[in-house]
């Protein structure tokens, strides 16, 4: 027994030693609906003996109920995980699968072909070394094929395998295969994909998946799995790049230890090496690389480490340790390619949160240079980006970011865009270059400032911002409020939506983008007036939360009061003082808030007026009392 | 320098995830289920924050039906490593004596585990919970993100998952939402065992084959762990050499016949195994797609 255990232990040791030499290939499989992606991945799992007996039993039951293979095991059902997709027969979300051969371990992202789910494909592609692009032999290169290939090229994936699948449906025709390969190569070269291997397959029958098929004697190349096993993955490429380590957190169990934790995303480091901390630019040396079982001599790209610097300096989350000889770029204006993944449009001027490495900053798109029409491969002018659209943008961050161009380093050049209100990830960005500030704008420091003017006025300036549906009574309340404040001896100014549109904003219409710009200008004007020492009343529908937030942030904290004039749509429509709802209902007015354009209710207004219960006078009472409580009025 | 091995790459990824979650969360917790995956997760967490103590407590949602050896292993681990452990038992279940025999596995699991977990998260106000689930375990898990947002009711909505790109995780939520984080997402069962072997990680002895009293229930071997197990008058547990590939409530966890009593032997056995590890879990067999339904309701 002891001997047997010894032998087993020896064998496992040997096996583990073998594993040390295994590398890891992450790849994605993408294609259009019904190209057979799931079947292909199911086939790879099946052929590498990773399907267990009980899974096979479930598969047989499911195949009889849902399968499309006439009762034969439908391998696609192995990977179509969610009940909803099994019933619809489509893959609606990216799924990760694992298998291994004696040569390599694989992580597969099964990414959907569905048009509205391209964002999932980008997710899968962001970590992949290789992409399998599936084409249905009967259909050839489609719009979806081009779109996916473009994303693959853009995300810097260097190896592409074109699997011309369902070859059984075209009689294993060499002519069909050759034609599709020709079409694809022409397109792929144009977008900069260099390393392409083309394989004729039938995932359903297993042709050229694991072993060469007798059905395609005209094909001399290796089967798909062999390509995956042998394609050169440059696992040391990351280690050859300049050293980069974004600081995730400071590990400080006591006063005597201060470690910086983070992933090494480029290069190598050894104790004693000089590093510079960006964005500050301070230089120090690596004193220790701390491991659980004692210190280590150094670290290499791919590891997560804790390092101690020789000098005590202020370094924290969001900073990046870099090789002194080849530091990253520090800038607050930069050009980036954006892939929009949000349901709501990307609008220039609207602030978003972006996360790059471990650094989180606020940023706005200052210029949408163009959109890329992937289907036609042309640049088109654009004022916004919609879900699944790609564009080249200039961005302005509120603080500096530390980055490398994406094509130099994915981990320091890729960022995500997070919506400030929903917290959803609404976009992905690839940094291209820093922008030299095109204009040297400096703030002119003035001796007479806001507080000086306010003192002379004997009041605290602020913005009272009234938002609500058209016809809710904003202007009526604002008028009454101004009279009340005037009577109290306050210096005020009322900015009214309709009036502003006759002058300052008469060039703006009512599209979403123009509404954003309308509010941005009003917010700036309100801020100037606050600076001048006035109490500013602003009555605007201002339907979008993000834009009201801009208005709030344009003035200092404590100088903004959001008043929600809350009326039901039915009541506003019944009141209809300007006859606008009737026009909108007749289709004569487009983008009318509440009818065919949304109104986002304030989630946490400072003052909430319910017009079904409060008269305009009572509304003014409520606002005045809020201003008093917040020391904006004596 | 040599390129990282597959296991080193997985370890680095998990440590990165653990640190990122802690850096972005106000009240994280580690859901500790005492199984091998929890042991690996705990080991990785200790590495991630060494030399500091774990910056979060462990939470065990207890059902009172765990194997006795699991509980003693849990308490021993906590004491030896100086960890903070919170144990929650759904008081409703205690009051009504919910058990798998009278109420069935579905009610038992929902009440003790799903509801119990939600209660505990709400009670302590945790807004981020680490869990040792892996994508290779079950089809619906293969589609879950590493950082997975839960509604205020702790539910998972597969159609509203956030894109997850590069190493960039988004842990921001509305105040009443929470995040489940799965640092072992990309590990397979085999990876877990090889890592346990390489790092010499202690695990519950139930994973090793030993003679244990067993009865057969619907084709599954159930170990009689205490006298709460109702037995037919003429049924006598037989003594078989068995071990577990996965651990849960003892009446719901099937054992396999085996002679593997060391980690290398378990790995050797795995290499020739023909059934998936969740086969031993009776709760998954309720119906095809049942794990997805449990996840939608708030179970892991």
Image: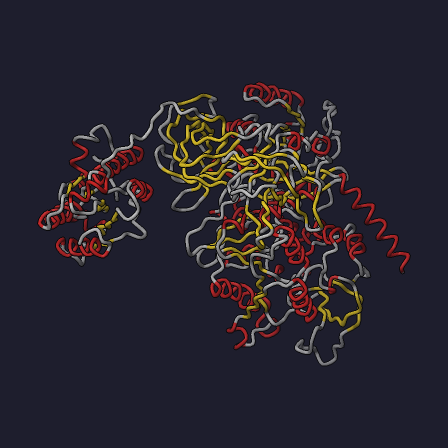
Q: Residue at x 36, y 24 (%)?
A: A440
Instruction: Determine whether B276 is above or below A299 in the image.
Output: below
Left or right, residue B100 beside residue A403: right
Q: Residue at x 77, y 62 (%)?
A: B208
**Residue A37 point in image, percent of width and height:** 60, 37
**Residue B223 point in image, percent of width and height:** 72, 70
Write down the quadrant of residue A372 in the picture.
top left
Hey, which residue is sitting farthest right in the picture? A3
**Residue A436 point in image, percent of width and height:** 43, 24
**Residue A367 point in image, percent of width and height:** 38, 27
Q: Nearer the viewer, residue B99 or A25?
A: A25
Hey, which residue is sitting farthest bottom in the picture? B233
Q: Nearer the viewer, residue A7 or A631?
A: A631
From the image, which quarter does the C terminus of chain A lie in? bottom left
Left or right, residue A407 beside residue B69: left
Hey, which residue is sitting farthest left in the picture? A487
Left or right, residue A617 beside residue A309: left
Residue B140: tell me if it is visible: no
Q: Residue at x 80, y 71 (%)?
A: B239
């Amino acid at each position: 027994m002891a001997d047997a255990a010894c032998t087993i232990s020896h064998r496992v040791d040997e096996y583990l030693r073998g594993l040390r030499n295994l590398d890891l290939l992450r790849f994605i499989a993408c294609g259009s609906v019904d190209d057979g992606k799931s079947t292909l991945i199911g086939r790879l799992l099946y052929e590498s003996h990773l399907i267990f007996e009980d899974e096979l039993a479930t598969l047989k039951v499911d195949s009889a109920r849902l399968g499309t293979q006439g009762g034969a095991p439908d391998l696609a059902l192995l990977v179509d995980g969610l009940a909803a997709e099994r019933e619809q027969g489509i893959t609606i979300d990216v799924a990760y699968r694992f298998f291994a051969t004696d040569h390599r371990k694989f992580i597969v992202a099964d990414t959907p072909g569905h048009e509205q789910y391209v964002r999932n494909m980008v997710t899968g592609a962001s970590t992949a070394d290789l992409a399998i692009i599936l084409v249905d032999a009967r259909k050839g290169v489609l719009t979806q094929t081009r779109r996916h290939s473009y994303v693959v090229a853009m995300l810097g994936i260097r190896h592409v395998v074109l699997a011309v699948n369902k070859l059984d449906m075209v009689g294993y025709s060499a002519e069909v295969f050759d034609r599709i390969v020709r079409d694809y190569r022409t397109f792929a070269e144009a977008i900069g994909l260099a390393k392409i291997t083309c394989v004729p397959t039938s995932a359903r029958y297993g042709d050229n998946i694991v072993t060469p098929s007798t059905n395609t004697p005209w094909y001399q190349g290796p089967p798909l799995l062999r390509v995956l096993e042998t394609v050169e993955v440059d696992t040391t490429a990351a280690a050859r790049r300049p050293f980069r380590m974004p600081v995730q957190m400071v590990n400080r169990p006591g006063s005597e230890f201060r470690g910086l934790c983070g992933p090494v995303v480029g290069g190598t480091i050894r104790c004693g090496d000089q590093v510079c901390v960006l964005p500050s630019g301070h230089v120090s040396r690596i004193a220790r690389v701390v491991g659980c079982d004692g210190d280590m001599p150094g670290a290499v790209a791919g590891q997560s480490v804790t390092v101690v610097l020789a000098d005590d300096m202020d370094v924290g989350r969001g900073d990046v340790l870099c090789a002194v000889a080849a530091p990253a770029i520090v800038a607050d204006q930069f050009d980036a390619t954006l892939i929009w993944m949000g349901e709501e449009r990307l609008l220039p001027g609207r602030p978003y949160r972006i996360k790059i490495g471990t650094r989180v900053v606020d940023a706005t798109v200052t210029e949408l240079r163009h959109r890329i029409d992937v289907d036609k491969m042309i640049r088109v002018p654009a004022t916004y980006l919609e879900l699944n659209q790609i564009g080249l943008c200039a961005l302005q961050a509120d603080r500096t970011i530390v980055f490398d161009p994406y094509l130099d380093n994915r981990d320091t050049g890729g960022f995500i865009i997070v919506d400030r209100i929903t917290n959803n990830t609404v976009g992905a960005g690839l940094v291209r270059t820093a922008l030299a500030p095109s204009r040297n704008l400096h703030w002119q420091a003035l001796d007479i400032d806001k507080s000086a003017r306010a003192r002379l006025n004997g009041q605290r300036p602020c913005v009272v911002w009234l938002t609500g549906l058209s016809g809710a009574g904003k202007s009526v309340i604002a008028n009454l409020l101004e009279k009340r404040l005037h009577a109290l001896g306050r210096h005020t100014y009322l900015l009214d939506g309709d009036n502003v549109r006759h002058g300052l904003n008469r060039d703006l219409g009512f599209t979403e983008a123009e509404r954003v710009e309308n509010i941005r200008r009003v917010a700036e004007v309100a801020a100037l007036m606050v600076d001048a020492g006035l109490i500013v009343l602003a009555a605007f529908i201002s339907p979008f939360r993000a834009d009201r937030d801009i208005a709030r942030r344009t003035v200092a904290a404590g100088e903004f009061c959001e008043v929600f004039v809350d009326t039901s749509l039915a009541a506003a429509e019944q009141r209809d003082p300007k006859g606008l709802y009737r026009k909108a209902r007749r289709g004569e007015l487009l983008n009318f808030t509440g009818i065919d354009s949304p109104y986002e209710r304030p989630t946490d207004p400072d003052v909430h007026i319910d017009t079904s219960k409060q008269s305009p006078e009572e509304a003014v009472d409520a606002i005045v009392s809020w201003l008093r409580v917040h020391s904006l009025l004596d | 320098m040599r390129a990282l091995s597959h296991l080193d790459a997985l370890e680095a990824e998990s440590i990165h995830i653990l640190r990122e979650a802690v850096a972005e969360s106000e009240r994280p917790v580690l859901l500790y289920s005492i199984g091998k995956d929890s042991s690996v997760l705990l080991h990785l967490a200790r590495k991630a924050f060494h030399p500091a103590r774990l910056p979060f407590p462990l939470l065990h949602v207890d059902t009172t039906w765990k194997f006795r050896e699991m509980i003693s292993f849990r308490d021993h681990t906590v004491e030896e490593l100086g960890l903070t452990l919170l144990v929650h038992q759904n008081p409703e279940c205690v009051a009504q004596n919910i058990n798998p025999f009278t109420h069935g596995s579905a009610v038992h699991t929902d009440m003790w585990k799903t509801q119990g977990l939600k209660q505990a998260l709400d009670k302590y106000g945790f807004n981020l919970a680490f869990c040792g689930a892996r994508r290779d375990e079950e089809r619906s898990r293969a589609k879950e993100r590493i950082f997975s947002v839960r509604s205020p009711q702790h539910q998972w909505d597969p159609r509203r998952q956030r894109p997850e790109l590069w190493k960039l995780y988004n842990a921001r939520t509305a105040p009443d939402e929470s995040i489940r984080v799965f640092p072992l997402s990309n590990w397979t069962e085999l990876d877990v065992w090889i890592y346990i072997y390489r790092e010499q990680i202690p695990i519950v002895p139930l994973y090793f084959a030993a003679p244990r009293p067993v009865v057969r229930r619907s084709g599954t071997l159930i170990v009689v762990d205490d006298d709460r197990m109702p037995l037919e008058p003429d049924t006598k547990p037989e003594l078989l050499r068995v071990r577990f590939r996965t651990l849960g409530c003892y009446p719901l966890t099937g054992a396999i016949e085996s002679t593997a009593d060391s980690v290398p032997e378990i790995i050797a056995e795995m290499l020739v195994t023909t059934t998936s590890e969740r086969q031993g879990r009776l709760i998954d067999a309720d119906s095809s797609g049942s794990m997805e339904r449990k996840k939608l309701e708030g179970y892991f």
